[in-house]
C-alpha cells in the first residue's frame, strides 16, 4: 500500500486570523458575563455560549495534514479524516495563485483553516482544505476540483502522479 504523509503548515495570515478570532470568540462571553443582568434571558445565555461553541466546532474541522493511502487522499483532522478517491483524477498541479480572487460560497475563511466551497474565475467552483494558500495544489476530477496545501507541494504532486 502506497503511504505518503504531508503536513499542513499555517501561513502567517492564518495564524493572525485564528489568534484574533479566538480572542474575540473568548472575549465576547467574558464581557457579557461581567455585565450580566440579574435576570437574563435565553437569548443572553445563547450569546454567551455561542462564541465558544463556534471556536470548538471550528477547531474540530482544522486540517492537520494530508495522507496519500493507496488510491485515496485523506485530509487529516483532529480525531477523524475526510477521504477522497483518486481513481478519476484527471490533473494535479502546484499553483500558488490558485485561490487568487476567490469568493467563499460556504465554509470557514480563516479560523483554523480555509475550508469549504469557494469559487473563482480560474477554477470555477471548488472545495478547499487549506492552511497556506502559497502552497496550493489543484486536483481536478470529472465532477469536482479540490485545493489542498501540503508542506511540500512538488513532492505531493509527484506522489499523486505515481499513484
Image (cartoon, rainbow, N blue to C red):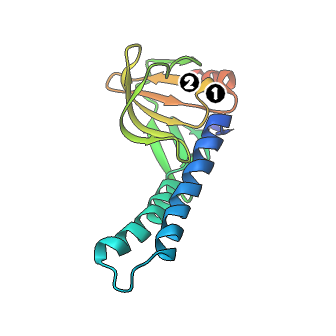
**Horizontal and vertical percent position of residue 154:** 67, 21
Viewer-closest of 163 and 78: 78
Instruction: Name the residue rendered at 64%, 21% in the picture.
Output: 158
Please give left or right for residue 113 compared with residue 6 in the image.
Answer: left
Residue bearing mark 2: 137
Mark closer to the observer (2, 1): 2
State how far apart marks 2 and 1 are (Cα): 8 Å
- Label 2 environment density (alpha carbons within 10 Å; few <14, some 14–19, many ≥20): many
x and y percent of residue 126 in the render?
38, 28
Residue 156 marker: 1
The C terminus sits in image quarter:
top right
Query: What percent of the width, then of the height, locates residue 29?
Result: 49, 68
- Number of numbered tags placed on the structure image: 2
Vertical order, 3 against 61 (above or below): above
Above-or-below relation of 74 to 91: below
Residue occupying the point 44% across, 59% down: 54
Q: Quadrant of residue 50?
A: bottom left
Residue contact between numbered discs 2 and 1, judged by CB atoms under 8 Å: yes
Secondary structure under tag 1 reads: helix
Classify mark 2: helix, strand or loop.
strand
* Residue displayed at 53% across by 47% down: 111
Left or right placement of residue 154 versus residue 120 in this view: right
> In the picture shown, does residue 148 fall above or below 89?
below
Where is residue 141 shown, x and y percent of the image?
Answer: 39, 23
Residue 11, can we see it? Answer: no
Q: Residues within 10 Å of mark 1 (few under 14, many from 20)?
A: many
Choose the circle earlier in sequence order: 2 or 1.
Answer: 2
Quadrant holding the N terminus: top right
Task: Answer yes or no: is residue 19 visible.
Answer: yes
For the point 39% across and 80% down, the residue is 37
Q: Left or right: where does residue 41 sit relative to residue 14?
A: left
Amino acid at each position: 500500500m502506497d503511504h505518503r504523509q504531508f503536513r499542513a503548515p499555517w501561513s502567517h495570515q492564518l495564524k493572525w486570523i485564528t489568534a484574533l478570532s479566538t480572542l474575540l470568540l473568548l472575549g465576547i462571553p467574558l464581557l457579557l458575563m461581567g455585565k450580566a443582568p440579574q435576570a437574563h434571558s435565553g437569548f443572553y445565555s445563547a450569546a454567551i455560549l455561542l462564541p465558544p461553541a463556534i471556536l470548538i466546532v471550528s477547531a474540530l474541522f482544522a486540517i492537520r495534514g494530508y495522507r496519500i493511502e493507496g488510491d485515496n487522499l485523506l485530509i487529516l483532522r483532529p480525531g477523524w479524516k475526510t477521504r477522497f478517491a483518486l481513481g478519476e483524477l484527471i490533473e494535479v498541479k502546484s499553483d500558488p495563485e490558485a485561490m487568487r480572487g476567490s469568493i467563499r460560497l460556504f465554509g470557514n475563511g480563516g479560523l483554523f483553516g480555509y475550508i469549504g466551497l469557494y469559487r473563482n474565475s480560474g477554477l470555477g467552483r471548488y472545495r478547499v482544505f487549506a492552511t497556506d494558500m502559497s502552497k496550493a495544489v489543484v486536483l481536478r476530477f470529472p465532477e469536482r476540483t479540490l485545493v489542498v496545501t501540503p508542506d511540500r507541494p512538488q513532492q505531493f504532486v509527484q506522489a499523486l502522479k505515481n499513484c
